[in-house]
């Protein structure tokens, strides 16, 4: 899909799309609740309640992670389950402890060969608790004419007790542990030996588990590292009502566009959310925009943007919009705490559109310009290019044409619907 955006300041109000991460965690908890019923006493009412609250098809909830993990849960009740995680390492990491807690034997397969570095860090965590790992006994089969590769096979269920993580493991693995350990017969604990890069996802897990009647106690040790104490013999119970929290990362994009000469309000956001992207208001305020937060909405009005320095190491989801704003803010700005190699697509967009941007390897430096040139860019399969180019169109002199713009739906289904709802002008 090729589109052309007419330079426009965005104004208006939209409803925040549901948080993708929260949607995923609620889907896992609902699947675990129903799975417990399947392996225990039959309770058709619980299964019906789950179907009645099937939110996964709501606009904005879908993600590739969600689709893959739901397929895994469909296979989990089988006597000899084979869980296909495609090429998705995050789903594999989350499902490892969940499968180890619920099945005596589980084989993981994927559409690509996973490197040993993807599996080894987690074997050292699960092996001391009784899980054995093997590879090679499962023959490679064909799925949709593509080869299936065995990642690993787990035998013996994980036992309750103490678990030690270095803090360098994928946060999805820690999330899976926190979801799985309450199901075991006895009490467990998880201790971090170093500070994890992010505690956002684990904190979100605890808030979701609470809604399903599960208790996990979070504390910090003498070094300030997170600790989790998990009572065993707990059961996830489907809540009577379910409210999905709005997604701060996707909302932050539009709030940032409000700072680029507009006035944008996003409703359906929680001010005390565990999502780190809620920091967008603080960052925009430091850049000179006027910001506001009420009980369920956030508002940003354009101000006199002034350059400043921002460390984005804890807020990677805000890098695309912050980059465009800092390219527009008067004076100099630095966006640090990022590996610029991960964001070369953003650099390419802004450089092509006439921004004064330099790459220092550990971040970007900007000398602000009031107006960018605009022009044409090929998304090349990267949603971040579409995000950066769309934001840049708010401050461009010429229209912005994006080749292959449909790729943004991988990251943000309904993206251009929200754009036009705020007054954006699109020509196909």
Image (spheres, rainbow, N blue to C red):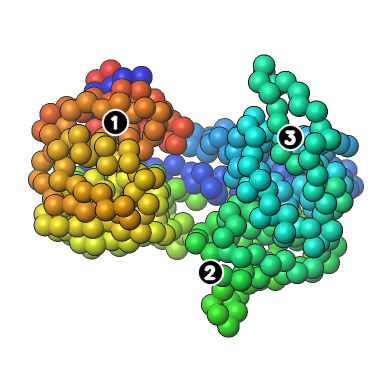
Residue 96 x, y percent position in the rendering: 71, 48
30 in relation to 168, above or below: above
**Residue found at x 32% / y 45%:** 320
Dot 1, how many residues are within 10 Å of its Cα: few (below 14), some (14-19), or many (20+)?
A: few
Residue at the spot of label 1:
420
- Please count the marks in the image: 3
Residue 103 x, y percent position in the rendering: 84, 46
Report which quarter residue 114 is drawn in. Answer: top right
381 in relation to 312, above or below: above
Lower position in the chain sequence, tag 2 or tag 3: 3
**Residue found at x 55% / y 49%:** 22
Dot 2, how many residues are within 10 Å of its Cα: few (below 14), some (14-19), or many (20+)?
A: some
Lower position in the chain sequence, tag 3 or tag 1: 3
Lower position in the chain sequence, tag 1 or tag 2: 2
Instruction: Using residue 23 as the reference point, say whether residue 71 is left or right of it.
Output: right
Q: Is residue 63 visible?
A: yes
Tell which tag, 2 or 3, sits nearer the viewer: 3
> Quarter of the image containing the C terminus?
top left
Dot 3, how many residues are within 10 Å of its Cα: few (below 14), some (14-19), or many (20+)?
A: many
Instruction: Using residue 75 as the reference point, say whether residue 399 is left or right of it.
Output: left
**Disc 1 versus disc 2: distance between alpha carbons?**
42 Å
**Residue found at x 66% / y 55%:** 121
Residue 92 x, y percent position in the rendering: 66, 43
Residue at the spot of label 3:
150
The secondary structure type at the circle numbered 3 is: strand
């Amino acid at each position: 899909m090729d589109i052309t955006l007419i330079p426009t300041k965005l104004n208006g109000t939209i409803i925040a799309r549901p948080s993708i991460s929260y949607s995923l965690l609620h889907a896992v908890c609902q699947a675990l609740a129903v799975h417990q019923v399947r392996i225990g006493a039959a309770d058709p009412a619980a299964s019906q309640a789950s179907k009645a609250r099937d939110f996964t098809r709501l606009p904005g909830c879908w993600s590739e992670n969600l689709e893959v993990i739901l397929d895994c849960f469909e296979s989990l009740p089988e006597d000899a389950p084979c869980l296909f995680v495609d090429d998705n390492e995050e789903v594999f990491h989350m499902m490892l402890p969940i499968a180890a807690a619920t099945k005596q034997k589980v084989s993981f397969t994927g559409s690509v060969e996973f490197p040993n570095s993807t599996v080894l860090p987690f074997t050292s965590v699960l092996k001391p608790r009784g899980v054995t790992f093997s590879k090679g006994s499962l023959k490679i089969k064909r799925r949709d004419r593509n080869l299936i590769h065995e990642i690993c096979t787990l035998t013996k269920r994980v036992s309750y007790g103490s678990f030690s993580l270095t803090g360098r493991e994928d946060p999805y693995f820690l999330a899976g542990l926190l979801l799985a350990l309450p199901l075991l017969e006895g009490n467990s604990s998880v201790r971090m030996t170093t500070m994890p890069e992010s505690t956002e996802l684990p904190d979100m897990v605890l808030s979701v588990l609470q809604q399903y009647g599960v208790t996990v106690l979070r504390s910090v040790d003498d070094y300030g590292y997170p600790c989790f104490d998990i009572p065993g013999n707990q059961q996830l119970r489907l809540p009577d009502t379910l409210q999905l929290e709005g997604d701060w990362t996707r909302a932050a994009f539009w709030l940032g566009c409000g700072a680029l000469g507009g006035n944008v309000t996003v409703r359906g956001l929680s001010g005390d959310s565990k999502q780190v992207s809620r920091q967008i208001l603080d960052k925009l305020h430091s850049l000179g925009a006027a910001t506001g937060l009420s009980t369920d909405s956030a508002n940003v009005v354009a101000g006199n943007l002034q350059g400043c320095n921002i460390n984005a190491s804890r807020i990677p989801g805000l890098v695309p919009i912050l980059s465009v704003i800092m390219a527009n803010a008067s004076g100099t700005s630095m966006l640090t705490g990022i590996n610029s190699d991960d964001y070369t697509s953003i650099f390419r967009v802004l450089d092509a559109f006439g921004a004064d941007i330099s790459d220092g390897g550990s971040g970007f430096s900007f000398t602000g310009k009031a107006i960018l040139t605009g022009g044409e860019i090929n998304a090349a399969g990267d949603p971040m290019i579409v995000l950066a180019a769309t934001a840049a169109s708010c401050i461009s002199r010429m229209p912005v044409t994006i080749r292959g713009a449909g790729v943004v739906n991988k990251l943000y289904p309904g993206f251009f619907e929200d754009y036009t709802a705020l007054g954006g002008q699109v020509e196909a």
